Amino acid sequence: MKTVWRLALAAAIVAYGGVIIGSWVRITGAGMSCPDWPLCHGSLLPSIAGGSAWEWSHRLVALFETPLVVTLVVMAWPLRKKLRPVAPLLGVVVALFILQVFLGAATVRLANAPLSVVLHWGTAMAFLGALIALTIFIRAPGWLEAGAPSPHRALFALLSATTLLAFVTMCVGAYVSSSGAGLACVQLPGCAGEMIVYGSSQFVQMAHRAVAGICLLTACATAAIALRYGSRSVRDTTCAGLALLFAQVFFGLLNVAWRLPLLMRELHSAMAALAFLTFIAALAMQAMQTSASRLKDVAA
């Protein structure tokens, strides 16, 4: 089982690398440096001039992910009877990976239209989240703690809400970036001195800020409940997610104040992805604790 866990973790790490390179491709405007798909300028070994190196590297990471996913499915499938979540999670991983590849091709066909970029990013993050959850469940015995407090319903609900809000925040942020709305509002906390705006770019920018703010507040409440009722692993992971959200907001503020430097934009995107994945991990741990508690009650 340890080998399968390591394989799942490796697949998640490679997928995260692909997400980071894809984010860099998006924020540098290199998405159309390879205007065809799956080749680049009709070649397997394209010129690395301009942004082609980044776009082609992004595709190569996705190509390298393929044998990892196939091997993971083959090796993890026998665990489905021992660990019930494995089978459905493997199905989700495979479905999202295939969808992600097709959406990657679609972004090229649609010349990186903002909606296609958001769908590609969102699917990639959902795929990565499924890999993280699968990794956690395969490692299940290591996360179940003796003497852990009884699972609290409010904690699971808050973790679910925070995870969903983190995902929505990322997707809206991807739309802001791909639509060129990053500097639609250059003042804080309002936009052009107003909290209510009417321009489409300004609306998207303010919607991103609003969702991020709600997500941060929800995460604070989640961490407070986790510190009171969560197991040690859930507490630590939830607090780590909250810290990453604060870092994400900080980098977001610097992006506006410093007028979108590339490195700051990449850090903002990377922190958002890490925060989402951390809450996915916490949610999976809490789900395991809840399932174990129910089985214990039934046995009693």
Image (cartoon, rainbow, N blue to C red):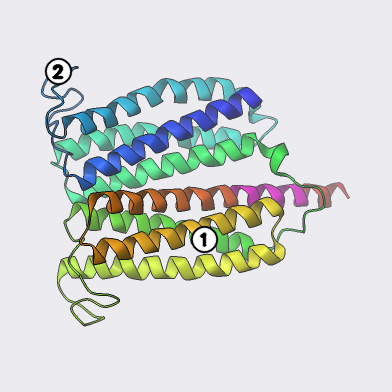
Depth check: give the residue in front, 122 or 263: 263
Task: Report the side of 290 relative to 277 (left or right).
Answer: right
Q: Which residue range is magenta in the image? A: 284-294
Task: Report the side of 293 relative to 56 (left or right).
Answer: right
* Residue 96 in view, yes or no: no
| Residue type, mark 2 in image | Ser
CA gap, disc 2 to disc 1? 44 Å
Per the image, the residue denoted by label 2 is 43
Above or below residue 88? Residue 299 is below
Helix, strand, or loop for circle 2? loop
Label whose residue precedes the other's in the sequence (2 or 1) = 2
Q: Residues within 10 Å of mark 1 (few under 14, many from 20)?
A: many
Residue at left 65%, top 57%?
A: 235
Above or below residue 36? Residue 74 is above
The image shows residue 239 at horizontal and vertical percentages of 58, 59
Membership of 289 in magenta stretch: yes
Main secondary structure type of the part rendered in magenta: helix
Residue 242, disc: 1
The image shows residue 156 at horizontal and vertical percentages of 61, 59
Task: Report the side of 122 relative to 223 (left or right).
Answer: left
Which residue is at the far top?
44
Depth check: give the residue in front, 220 or 186: 186
Membership of 27 in magenta stretch: no
The image shows residue 88 at horizontal and vertical percentages of 55, 37
Residue at left 16%, top 47%?
A: 113
Q: Residues within 10 Å of mark 2 (few under 14, many from 20)?
A: few
